[in-house]
Image (spheres, grey):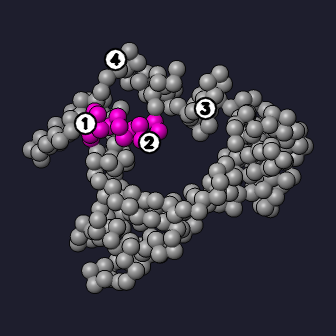
Amino acid sequence: MAVTCIQTLYLGYGKQWLSNRSTSVNDFIKNEYDPYVYKKISGSSVAYLVLYVNDILLIGNDVKMLGDIKPWLSTQFSIKNMGKASYILGIKIYRDRSRRMLGLTQSPNIEKILKRFKMENSKRGFLSMRHGIKLYKKQSPKADEELRRMLDIPYGLAVGSIYTKQATTEDSTTKAEYIAVNEAVWMKNYIQELEAVWMKNYIQKLGVVPSIAEPVVIFYDNNGAIAQAKEPRSHHRSKHILRRYHLLREMVSKGEVRMDRVSSAENTADPLTKPMSQIAHAQHLDKMGLRSMGDWL
């Protein structure tokens, strides 16, 4: 589907829409995998209505169809037409009709952070973090006064990281990796199924791609975890793993998911977890589909 128009509306009382939990509203069919996404089809015209708190995002390939939807919405709710969408969840929508390009950019957020720390005039360059750098405990502050001085370093607030401790303690790397891959793909806060499988079904219900018959491929770089996911029988070394962590194994046996080995050097997710060489970092970002705005313009 070619996107023709993206518009935003402000809904005076968002709960009014949510109170109607029927599967169909004025020919809008609710996506069974996300109750805040609705789709309407009329011939070759398609419109999507996405609700977030008090905001409505209208997306479609037919301007006239979207124009007909807005008057109906105004008869049902108190709304305000905000015009063509420029931002969605704080992310700027970039569009170049002459080049048939549509993208998302967070450059305004980056510029805001730079201004906050008086770095808006800094020159573009690569981070000084070196791949393979060795750190030692003796480099840490040895007294409270040293620690307080570190907290006052200007760039201390601009750069940070978040780590999440695994909920269970395991006695082997294989067990820890096996649990980690389960937690990474399990949508614990929505429904008890793999997030990858949920995403597959969600996209399929959107109707923007043909039917997805192939299993979802999960690339992982730990041979032991992959073997555990493919093993239908319980092994004496894995019998202490809680049953809920074997959901991945069940999905693999059903053909919903396929586990494939990927070497650490080819693991696209590595830039999110570790420092890398400049060349490898750029290659992985390209695989993720991330592009510099300068490459577009």
Q: Which residue is mark 1?
A: 277
Q: Which residue is mark 3?
A: 102
Q: Find residue 88 and report its horizontal and vertical position in percent.
A: 62, 37
Q: Is residue 74 visible to the viewer in this orientation of the structure?
A: no
Disc 1 or 3, which lies upstream in sequence? 3
What is the C-alpha distance between the residues marked 4 and 2?
25 Å
Q: In which quarter of the view is residue 181 placed?
A: bottom left
The reply to whether the magenta stretch includes residue 284 is yes
Rendered position, 75 above or below 175: above
Disc 2 or 3, which lies upstream in sequence? 3
**What kind of element bears circle 3?**
strand
Disc 3 or 4, which lies upstream in sequence? 3
Q: Which residue is mark 2?
A: 288
Q: Residues within 10 Å of mark 2 (few under 14, many from 20)?
A: few
What is the C-alpha distance between the residues marked 3 and 4?
28 Å
Q: Residues within 10 Å of mark 1 (few under 14, many from 20)?
A: few
Could you tell me which quadrant the N terminus lies in? top right
Q: In which quarter of the view is residue 222 placed?
A: bottom left
